[in-house]
Structures are given as C-alpha cells and as structure tokens.
Image: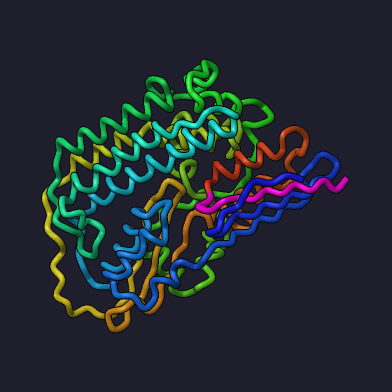
Amino acid sequence: MSGTGAGLEGNVSVRLGTAAGRVRAVSVQVRRPAAAHALCGRTPDEAMRLVPLLFSLCGTAQSLAAVEALEAALGLDARPHTAARALLADAESVTNHAWQVLMDWPARLGEALQPKEVAGLRAAVTAIHPALYPARDGLRPGGGSLRPDRAALTAAIAALREGVERAVFAGPAPTDRTALERWAGAGATPAARLMHRVLTPVMAGFGACDVPALEPHPAFWFGERLSADAAFSEVPRQDGAPAHTGPLARQSAHPLVAGLLARHGTGLAAHTAARLVELAGLAERLTTWAERLDDAEPAPDTGTARRGAGSGVVETARGRLAHWLRLEDGRIADCRIVAPTEWNFATDGPLAQGLAGASANGALAERTGLLVAALDPCVASVITIQDED
C-alpha cells in the first residue's frame, strides 16, 4: 500500500486494487468545500473581494469568470477589456505551469526544487496587473481604468520568456517530436530529464484512454447546464459522457503533441509534452494580447439592474472554468461553479478510465502519481494501492 499526502482544503482520493499484474479496480473521489456557496448573499462588489481569497491557486481566473458572469447578469458591456483580461489569465497560467515544472517535477526525480526561478516568474506576472490598470481595479464588474504601460508590459513578458527558456528548456523549446526526444535525451534541465523518463515505453502510453477532450464551449453552454442542474457542478457531462480538459485538450493539434498522440495515445508522454508546449508558447500569446490593447474606461453602470442571471468562462492552466450566478435584489441568490478538477477526476473520467486495466508491474505508484499530476487537480491527492493477490 502506498500514498501521498492530502491538504486541509479537500483532496482527490485515488484507490487502486491490483491482482494478477493488472489494475482490477479504480475509485476516484473528489472532496472539496463548496466555495460557491460562500458567494451567495453577497453584493457583486463583496463577491469580487472574496473570490481571490476563496481560490488561492487560480484567483485571477476565478475572478475573471465571476466578473464575466456578473456583467452578463447586470447587462454590462466590458468588451473593451477583453484583451487585458486574456493577458491576465494567460499570465497566471505561466506561474501555475511553472510551479509544476520547476517544483513538482524535480521533486518526483529526487532533485533540487527551483523556488527562485518560480519566484522570478511570479514577480514578472505580478507586475502585469498594475501595468494594465494603474489603480489595480481591473477585476471589477465593468472593468477598471485601462491604461496600458507598454514598456512595463514588454519588460514583464520578456522576463517571463527568458525565465522559461532558461529554467525549463535551457534554450529554445523543441517544436517537433524528434527535437523533443533529442532535448529530453540531453537532459539539461529537470524538465528535460522528466520528459526523458516519461518517453520510456513503460511510461509513454500509461493512462491513455478514449475519453474525448472538452470542446471550447462558450459561457452560455455552461450557463444553461449549471442553471438547469445543480449536480452539473460536481458531475459535469459533455454529450452525456465524461471529457478531459487542460493543456492536452488545447494543444492536441500542435505538431509535437499530435505526433505523440498518434504514437502513444493520451498517455503520460502527450500530457507532459502538452504542458511544455503551452508553457513555451505563452510569452508569444501574451505579446499578441498586449498588441491589441487600447485605453478603456469602465463600462457605464446605470444602477438599475438588480436581478438577472449570467455565466462566465475562462481557460486556466488546469482547463476550462465556468461560473453561473443569479442576482436577486442586487445580491447573489445562487452561484454554481464547474472547475477542471470535476472533469478530469470524475468517477468515470480520464484518470479512472486511464488507470483501469493498466499494468501493475513496475513503478505503478510513480506512474499513477505522474498521471494525477498531469491532470492537475486543484487540491492535494491521495493515492492508495492495494495488492489483492
């Protein structure tokens, strides 16, 4: 029997039963507090102050999904802030990807962690919000006073690009499967050494399954389902079936990832490479958003909308996040959230299906831990393996 630690804010529990060299039983359970309930009864301003406190790992993305839902309910048009918000969301994704690549991956290899590199990237990301909104008022219904400081944004994005290239890739990122294998084999960074391990035959296809990717559904698709069925928050479905969301769902068409999918399926190699591909491309995405920025004012609020419903959706490092809420008398009467964890760790989702029937020979605990990390829950994980022979 083996396990990894769990935190106080909920956990993902993975239980495997093995017999005759195979995984014969899989149980995946998600336990975490219903944070959406804490927003009920709040005014929009109170809710927006509370959201980043409730969601420490992806506070910006959660705030953006909540503010989009509030704006839809209030009838506010914040489209002039679209590029700035996309820049904020993608910048946060850099730090979330980097934490896994520079802290979690070295730990799995028994190597030194890289907290200084993570801190440098976080410092660059922290500089972006005030470079967009000098009053730091960007995460409010209707948006804030958008006054892009282009020099500060250029410097922050350059720092992110240089930090990622140095700490993760030790040079330019590989762009196809051959280059990836060569880079991984050279082993210049912990990321390269973990990729090299994941590319071995016993690892590369581990966890592959037929669960489809979550499509990039718009906010109203989620809003329709969340409003109609409270259970959708905990057991979401796409066409009546489970789906996976995150880097692999977004990067499946990239030539490097597509090559690994064709060879190994949706296993560890494809998941791991998709995260690296996404991290390598984020600086360019940030630059693209920055080029689309213009000064903008907050959307005018007539103060007459006190009831209504709306939904918001944001791509986070972990996958697609959606909020739906309903206002009554100027306060949130109901709020529902479906996060990537509920998709990836569904009882019959990509983790459960990827583990079912897998070979139990070799380092099953290590492989399972890597697969859980690749699907990236927003809470701690506990893995228990019971050999029934």
Q: Quadrant of the C terminus?
A: top right
Q: Is residue 266 magenta?
A: no
Q: Quadrant of the N terminus?
A: top right
Tell whether 119 sits left or right of 133: right
Q: On screen, 280 above or below 313?
A: above
Work out which residue is located at the far bottom of the displayed protein and give it. 329
* Region of the chain picked out in magenta, as a range: 377-389
Q: Quadrant of residue 53?
A: bottom left
Q: Quadrant of residue 173?
A: top left
Q: On screen, 251 above or below 313?
A: above
Number of callouts: 0
Q: Position of residue 211 (x, y in %)?
A: 59, 49
Q: Is residue 383 magenta?
A: yes
Q: Residue at 75% x, 32% y: name it.
A: 362
Residue 170 in sight:
yes
Q: On screen, 279 above or below 144?
A: above
Q: On screen, 206 above or below 382?
A: above
Tell whether 135 sits left or right of 58: left
Principal secondary structure, stretch drawn in magenta = strand
Q: Residue at 43% x, 40% y: name it.
A: 97
Work out which residue is located at the far right of the displayed protein and give it. 389
Q: Position of residue 178 (x, y in %)?
A: 50, 19
Tell whether 372 sits left or right of 69: right
Depth check: 235 or 146 in front? 146
Q: Position of residue 278 (x, y in %)?
A: 41, 36
Q: Quadrant of residue 124?
A: top left
Tell whether 127 sits left or right of 317: left
Residue 274 in sight:
no
Q: Residue at 26% x, 69% y: name it.
A: 45
